[in-house]
Amino acid sequence: MIAQPFSAPEQSRSIVVALGGNALLPPGERGDIHQQFAHTRESLEPVVELARAGWRIVLVHGNGPQIGDELLRNELARDRLPPLPLGVLVAATAGWIGYMIQQSLQNALERAGIARGVVTLVTQVLVDPADPATHEPVKPVGRVLDEESARALQQELGWAVGRGPEGWRRLAPSPRPLAIVEREQIRRLLEADTIVIAAGGGGTPVYRDPVLRLEGVDAVIDKDRAAAVLARDIGAEALLILTNVEGVFVGYGRPDQQLLRRLTASRAQELLEAGEFGGGSMGPKVEAAISFVRGGGRRAIITRLDVGLAAVRGEAGTVIVPDEAAGPESIERHVT
């Protein structure tokens, strides 16, 4: 098939798409690179369809399983090579996962006859060094350990460790992102109709030192929060958060669970504060969606990967809108 030159709509629209790391490496798999390439190819159909529809796209991906593998490699090689800090490992995974997505997307676009460029940008994300979250290790990262191994790594490498429901794991700070350092470069790439893969793994956290200027932080950033800040910084119309469930539910997992199809930011905030959304799962996604629409975005959509384009069209998933854009809210009862 001969690729046709990209023809943008008169009013080109920008969208930031947040794709979870588990979409590229599902739980329970060994995760060799061939499996990860295969899952990557499978996950990109919604992005190809958005490109066909004329959207200008930034793709943000997670790296949870992959950063765990990188930490394990560092542990195993620590007697021969100095371990790398988390910020550097995030940048490393952003590079190689970005390459994997970039190549797979280039091939998919070519097969679809869509002439769009794709580029990966290793991204720095500004955080506040005075924010306690920048230094407080609370987010579990890496593999599950037994207590003896966890204590040994704590003593040898200075890691913070803690015990959770699954066992002992390393704990890392997870600061709130304030701004995307490379936002202007991303804007210019979008204006050239290039699809940009950015803020991979949430981006590498940095702060501004009065003398040294940009300096890295040994921490990780939630990728959905980073996607919301990126979407705000580039003036995107929409934020699409792709996950493994149809949308946002109240009473999730109960026989009477309800799928919420449309929410205002205020209503979503009320439900979030009431504890309706899991702190380690849906909660951060809803929080990111609220942040985006309150920061100027028109709509944030949370839905399952395979119905991403339908959700952008308003046919699936959950949409969160600014309070001033509220029409009659609808709740679709969905029992599983």
Image (spheres, grey):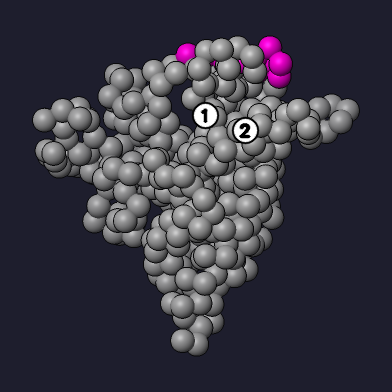
Q: Quadrant of residue 142?
A: top right
Please tell me which residue is depicted at 61% across the width and 58% down the height of the picture. Answer: 99
Left or right of residue 292: residue 93? right
- Give residue 71's mark: 2
Residue extending furthest right? Answer: 211
Please tell me which residue is depicted at 31% across the width and 20% down the height of the picture. Answer: 275
Label 1–label 2 contact, CB within 8 A = yes
Mark 1, residues whose alpha carbon is within 10 Å: few (<14), some, or many (≥20)? some
Three-letter amino acid code of the residue under disc 2: Leu
Taking the magenta stretch, the answer to whether it contains residue 161 is yes
Magenta-tinted stretch: 154-163
Give SS at disc 2. helix
Q: Which of 175 and 140 is in front in this view?
A: 140
Q: Quadrant of residue 318?
A: top left
Left or right of residue 16: residue 301? left
Give SS at disc 1. strand
Mark 2, residues whose alpha carbon is within 10 Å: few (<14), some, or many (≥20)? many
Percent position (x, y) of residue 27?
Answer: 40, 40
Taking the magenta stretch, the answer to whether it contains residue 307 is no
Three-letter amino acid code of the residue under disc 1: Arg
Question: Where 281 falls versus 130 (above or below)?
Answer: below
Q: Which of 193 and 215 is in front in this view?
A: 215
- Give residue 143's mark: 1
Quadrant of the image containing the C terminus: top left
Q: Is residue 59 visible?
A: no
Question: Does label 1 or label 2 sit earlier along the sequence?
Answer: 2
Percent position (x, y) of residue 253?
Answer: 20, 30
